[in-house]
């Protein structure tokens, strides 16, 4: 797990803080998730009437793909949230809703920062239902330091399969708001939420803005994807303060609403770090290549290799083997195959090292041997042959990787992301 935080003045929680949700003095790692029953989640993807093609891409990829829909996600439901459709789209939306049954039409005009998020949470507080799934093979376990220690020592028998028994519906444990340019791996999302407190929990990517009234710095979870525990959803849905403060950047308003909670000092803010980022071609501050556990471990073990001293200090935090700082993406070589293009978009991969912005920092290995230098095409082909397997990328497991990629604006970027993170269903 990443750092836990709470507000007023945002500071990392300590075991002595009254909001500390665990019985031990350490934050449980994600390893504890394997000893816990999966949680139920409603994922509301904010969309508009004209975005039918994007909704189809979502249905065909992360909402249904087996690599996203691994066992444990039976209680995760994806719905598409929109205001009332404009007249030219009304019939199409009615047909789409009848066919798929996954559209949530709020009784508001379509908007992004004029109350849509509050209307969604107000609806969810009263009406949200997801599949009611139980996992008989999983003994109920409280998240505690003792449980984590026992799991690490092998005293818990970890499940090889999370066989679900689903009957009827129930309220979700958590409600997620997501953008439709966010590609979510549902199994990774559920696993992150599984280890959170079930009450007073606010999860996402921590950002900084301004307080609604004082213009001082405030904190909030970025709007591409964040989760509230169900009790906070009910608070937001009934809060007079929240209802009176719905205008403005919706993600910042959510942070304001949580600060207005009568027990705001007990709300646990959980910020994700490595595993939420922008698409490598988006040219954003958080853009970098597709991330897997192997490269994260490599960076931790050998930072100098991935962050050469030649790189200016002001871009160290945003340096990437794939996405050059504030420059358009270019593949390392023209005429790559589709598989090679995806490999070149993978952070830290051998092929990604041959992007133009990396070449000054990485010497050709055959120079030391005295052999004639390889051409760039030969170097790229060798890097392609040296690529890790998916099992190697995942460090021998099948969990603990990217949760969400944002700014996936183009349909071809979306398909790239699906191929990189999920693979094709035929292989």
Image (spheres, rainbow, N blue to C red):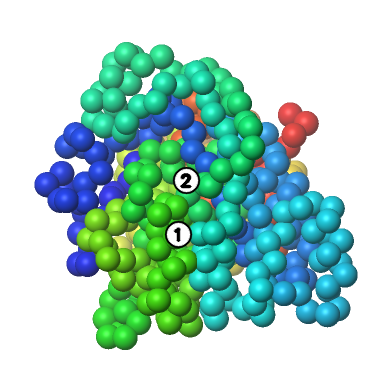
- Secondary element at tag 1: helix
**Residue 58 drawn at (x, y percent):** 70, 52
Disc tally is 2
Q: Who's the residue at 67% across and 80% down the image? A: 109
Residue 412 lies left or right of residue 275; in this view the side is right
Residue 255 has which mark? Answer: none
Residue 233 has which mark? Answer: 1
The answer to whether any part of residue 278 appears in the image is no
User: Which corner quadrant holds the C terminus?
Assistant: top right
The answer to whether any part of residue 37 appears in the image is yes
Q: Nearer the viewer, residue 7 or 229?
A: 229
Q: Who's the residue at 64% across and 37% down the image? A: 168
Q: Which residue is mark 2?
A: 173
Q: Who's the residue at 15% across and 44% down the image? A: 15
State which quadrant residue 261 falls in. Answer: bottom left
Q: Is residue 282 above or below residue 376?
A: below
**Residue 174 drawn at (x, y percent):** 47, 49
- Secondary element at tag 2: loop
Residue 418 lies left or right of residue 312; in this view the side is right
Residue 422 lies left or right of residue 270; in this view the side is right
**Residue 13 drawn at (x, y percent):** 20, 51
Q: Residues within 10 Å of mark 2 (few under 14, many from 20)?
A: many
């Amino acid at each position: 797990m990443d750092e836990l935080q709470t507000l007023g003045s945002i500071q990392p929680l300590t075991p002595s803080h009254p909001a500390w949700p665990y019985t031990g003095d350490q934050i449980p790692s994600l390893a504890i998730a394997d000893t816990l029953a999966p949680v139920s989640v409603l994922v509301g993807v904010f969309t508009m009437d004209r975005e039918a093609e994007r909704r189809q891409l979502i249905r065909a990829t992360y909402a249904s793909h087996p690599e996203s829909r691994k066992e444990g996600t039976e209680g995760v439901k994806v719905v598409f949230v929109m205001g009332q459709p404009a007249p030219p789209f009304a019939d199409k939306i009615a047909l789409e809703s009848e066919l798929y049954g996954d559209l949530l039409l709020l009784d508001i005009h379509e908007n992004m920062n004029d109350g849509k998020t509050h209307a969604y949470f107000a609806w969810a507080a009263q009406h949200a239902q997801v599949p009611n799934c139980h996992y008989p093979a999983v003994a109920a376990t409280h998240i505690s330091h003792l449980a984590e220690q026992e799991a690490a020592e092998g005293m818990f028998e970890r499940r090889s399969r999370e066989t679900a028994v689903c009957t009827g519906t129930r309220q979700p444990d958590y409600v997620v708001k997501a953008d439709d340019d966010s590609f979510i791996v549902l199994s990774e999302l559920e696993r992150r939420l599984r280890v959170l407190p079930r009450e007073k929990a606010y999860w996402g990517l921590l950002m900084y803005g301004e307080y609604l009234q004082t213009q001082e710095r405030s904190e909030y979870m970025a709007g591409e994807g964040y989760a509230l525990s169900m009790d906070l959803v009910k608070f937001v849905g009934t809060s007079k303060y929240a209802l009176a403060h719905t205008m403005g950047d919706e993600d910042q308003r959510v942070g304001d609403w949580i600060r207005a909670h009568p027990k705001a000092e007990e709300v646990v803010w959980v910020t994700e770090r490595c595993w939420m980022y922008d698409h490598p071609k988006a040219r954003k501050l958080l853009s970098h290549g597709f991330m897997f556990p192997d490269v994260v471990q490599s960076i931790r073990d050998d930072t100098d290799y991935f962050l050469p001293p030649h790189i200016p200090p002001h871009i160290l935090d945003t340096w990437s083997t794939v996405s050059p700082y504030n420059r358009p993406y270019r593949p390392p070589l023209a005429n790559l195959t589709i598989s090679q293009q995806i490999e070149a978009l993978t952070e830290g991969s051998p092929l990604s090292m041959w992007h133009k912005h990396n070449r000054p920092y990485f010497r050709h290995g055959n120079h030391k041997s005295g052999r004639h230098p390889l051409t760039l095409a030969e170097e790229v082909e060798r890097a392609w042959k040296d690529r890790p397997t998916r099992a190697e990328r995942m460090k021998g497991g099948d969990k603990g990787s990217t949760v969400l990629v944002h700014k996936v604006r183009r349909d071809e970027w979306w398909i790239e992301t699906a191929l990189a993170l999920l693979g094709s269903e035929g292989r």
